[in-house]
Image: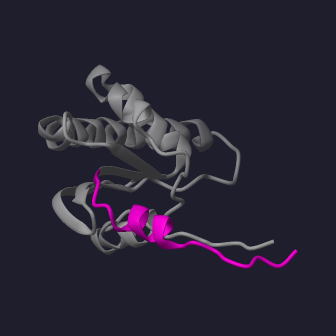
């Protein structure tokens, strides 16, 4: 069915609004936390910690390897939660939306690691950003993905 008129002005106006958005991107191996006003990165904290990859072989060393990996992951989660609490708490009242990304399990563990981070889940947008590596360049690019819109005419 052809449309005689499509009004895009409301879409463009909505996309032009500059919201305060917090971002939490976590994968085993690193994290990136930021606060944006529109496309501008106002505050950021990044960190990395070595976490061994999965061990494919069995044997007597498999359990030791698993325990070491779990401990490394636990330390990363704790560090990311501490950094998120420190960086985001001053912005808590101003943040309108939260963008979560990286690895779902790692991100949910960070949010669940500290009670004062519970508000992140409450303000999280439905879209989860699957980023391969939470680094500064990925964090700086996030607003372009946040404010992207796709117009589909059927």
Q: Residue at x 31, y 43 (%)?
A: 96
Give the mark count: 0
* Magenta stretch holds residue 12: yes
Work out whether residue 123 or residue 129 is closer to the camera in this orientation and state it: 123
Q: Is residue 153 above or below residue 33?
A: below
Work out whether residue 141 or residue 51 is closer to the camera in this orientation and state it: 141
Horizontal side of 110 relative to 39 (left or right) equals right
- The residues colored magenta run 1-20
Q: From the top left corner, tell me how far across and down residue 16 is, in percent.
A: 34, 68
Does any portion of residue 75 appear in the rendered image? yes
Name the image quarter holding residue 142.
bottom left
Q: Residue at x 41, y 27 (%)?
A: 112
Q: From the top left corner, tell me how far across and down residue 18 is, in percent.
A: 27, 60
Horizontal side of 88 relative to 104 (left or right) equals left
Q: From the top left corner, tell me how far across and down residue 66 is, in percent.
A: 54, 40
Does any portion of residue 133 appear in the rendered image? no
Work out whether residue 127 or residue 63 is closer to the camera in this orientation and state it: 127
Q: Is residue 151 above or below residue 109?
A: below
Quadrant in the picture for the C terminus: bottom right
Q: Residue at x 36, y 39 (%)?
A: 77
Outermost residue toward the left in this view: 90
Horizontal side of 66 relative to 33 (left or right) equals right
Name the image quarter holding residue 149.
bottom right
Q: From the top left corner, tell me how far across and down residue 97 is, in percent.
A: 36, 45
Quadrant in the picture for the N terminus: bottom right
Outermost residue toward the top in this view: 115
């Amino acid at each position: 069915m052809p449309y005689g008129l499509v009004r895009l002005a409301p879409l463009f106006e909505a996309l032009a609004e500059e919201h305060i958005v917090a971002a939490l991107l976590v994968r085993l191996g690193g994290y990136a936390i930021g606060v944006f006003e529109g496309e501008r990165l106002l505050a950021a904290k990044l960190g990395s910690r070595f976490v061994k990859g999965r061990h494919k072989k069995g044997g007597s060393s498999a359990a030791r390897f698993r325990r070491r990996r779990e401990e490394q992951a636990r330390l990363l989660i704790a560090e990311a939660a501490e950094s998120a609490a420190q960086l985001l708490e001053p912005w808590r009242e101003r943040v309108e939306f939260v963008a979560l990304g990286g690895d779902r399990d790692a991100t949910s563990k960070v949010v669940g690691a500290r009670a004062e981070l519970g508000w992140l889940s409450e303000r999280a947008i439905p879209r989860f950003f699957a980023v391969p590596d939470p680094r500064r360049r990925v964090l700086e690019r996030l607003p372009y993905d946040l404010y992207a819109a796709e117009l589909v005419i059927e």
